[in-house]
Amino acid sequence: MIAENLQILRNRIEEICEKVNRDPKSVKLIAVSKGFSIDEIKQAIHADQIEFGENKAQELVAKFEVFGNQVIWHFIGHLQRNKVKYAVRTADYIHSVDSLSLAEEIQKRAENLGKTKKILIEVKTSEEETKSGVTEKEEIKRIARYCSQASNLSLIGLMTIAPLTEDKNLIRKSFSYLRKLKEELNTEGYELKELSMGMTSDYEIAIEEGATMLRIGSAIFGERIYYKED
Ligand SMILES: *Cc1c(COP(=O)(O)O)cnc(C)c1O
């Protein structure tokens, strides 16, 4: 089932890329395995999936104990300061940097481990109350400036979660805002390459708007029966 879902999804991603004249290789699929089991991850690995996303530090650590660096791990959830050490030890990428103090803590922990962490700044691109991320452009730039000078951080892009709505225009607006923000930062000297955007319900629009990293869970693993956010 998981292998089949992955195949369908990969085909669909390729189709959309063709439609909008993008190289399918420029769109990376991250399988969001939060709430799913070791066995389900194994099935995905068997189907040649190598990048996985988790949104809770403890759950990531538990899965890291099993798979280690056989898998490339992306931390995509809200990260509390006291959990940074776990995320830094296990995740190759942290998508959800939403404050300067979080960036500073990641830098400190990464330096202690002698590692460089690939990070993305999470931007709030919709009015929705529940969505996390940084809103103020000045704050985003402040974090970007810090990250580009920090010895153990590599700022590679921006991440967002689109609003939960049937209104495709609102979703598109959210993604295109992120793309334009990345372009703006790059005209100011940054070299951001990644746009982490698009989930099961909206990845097609995300690809059309330039996503380079899709974070997709339920289209691969099925519906999460019950999942509590942090
Ligand atoms: C759960 C989650 C996803 C994946 O959501 P699906 O709808 O299952 O594809 C993507 N990004 C973040 C930040 C998530 O928490």
Image: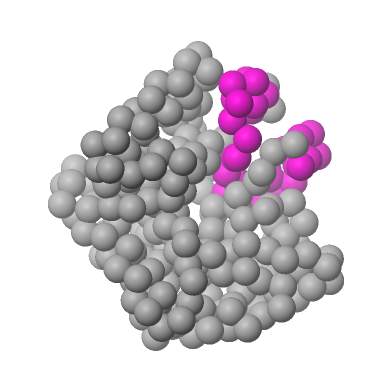
Q: Is residue 43 above or below residue 182?
A: above
In the rendered image of this protein, does residue 180 appear above or below residue 10? below
Identify the residue shown where x is 52% and y is 41%.
30
Residue 132: name its quadrant: bottom left
Q: Residue 205, how many percent across, how many down? A: 26, 45
The reply to whether residue 62 is visible in this rendering is no
**What percent of the width, then of the height, locates residue 158?**
45, 64
What secondary structure is the stretch in magenta mostly built from? helix
| Left or right of 177 on screen, residue 220 | right
- Residue 46 lies in the magenta-colored region: yes
Q: Is residue 67 magenta?
A: yes
Pick the residue in front: 15 or 122. 15
Give the vertical position of 175 relative to 121 (above or below): above
Name the residue rendered at 58%, 64% in the picture: 119
- Residue drawn 36% across the image and 32% down it: 14
Q: Position of residue 69 (x, y in %)?
A: 76, 42
Q: Nearer the viewer, residue 130 or 53?
A: 53
In this view, 73 is above or below 80:
above
Kindly identify the residue that appears in the image at 30 percent across and 30 percent down: 15
In magenta, the rendered stretch is: 41-69
Residue 148 shown left or right of residue 222 in the figure: right
Left or right, 148 with reference to 6 = right
Res 221 visible: yes
Please count the marks in the image.
0
Color style of the picture: one colour
Q: Residue 122: x percent and y percent?
A: 46, 65
